[in-house]
Image (spheres, grey):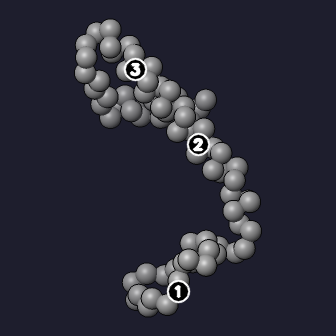
Amino acid sequence: MDNCSANQTKCKLDNIELKFLPPNTTARLQPLDRSTKSFKVGYRRRLLDRLLMNLRVGPELKVDQLGAIHMMTGAWNA
């Protein structure tokens, strides 16, 4: 959890251990956020490409697990 004042620590849960990030950690995580956004954009682009290709063949878009993995791999390596 981040150090936002909205996050309260008054709750006592035996099975859950809360870890709080040190102050100003957000600035260090921004490159990771950028990589995540880039991955999502790449995956959506590949999904839309597949949708456009399938519109020529049939009206329904079907993506199986293997196809989704291939699109994720392509987005990750881009």
CB atoms at circles 3 and 2 under 8 Å apart?
no
Q: Residue at x 54, y 78 (%)?
A: 7
| Quadrant location of the C terminus in the rendered image | top right
Secondary structure found at label 1: loop
Check disc 3 and report the residue beneath it. Answer: 50
Drawn side of residue 55 relative to residue 39, left or right: left
Amino acid type, label 1:
Thr
Q: Position of residue 56 (x, y in %)?
A: 32, 8
Check disc 2 and report the residue beneath it. Answer: 37
Q: Does residue 26 appear in this view?
A: yes
In this view, the residue in front, 43 or 71, is: 43
Marks 3 and 2, how far apart in space?
20 Å
1 lies above or below 47: below
Secondary structure found at label 2: helix
Marks 1 and 2, how far apart in space?
30 Å
Drawn side of residue 67 relative to residue 78, left or right: left
In the rendered structure, find residue 44 and report the number of the disc placed on it.
none
| N-term mark: 3 or 1 | 1
| N-term mark: 1 or 2 | 1
| Quadrant location of the N terminus in the rendered image | bottom right
Amino acid type, label 3:
Arg
Secondary structure found at label 3: helix
Check disc 1 and report the residue beneath it. Answer: 9
Residue 48: which quarter of the image?
Answer: top left
53 lies above or below 33: above
Q: Position of residue 24 (x, y in %)?
A: 74, 68
Drawn side of residue 64 relative to residue 29, left or right: left
Mark 2: few/some/many CA within 10 Å (<14, 14-19, 20+): few
2 lies above or below 65: below
In this view, the residue in front, 62 or 6, is: 6
Mark 1: few/some/many CA within 10 Å (<14, 14-19, 20+): few
Q: Residue furthest front?
A: 6
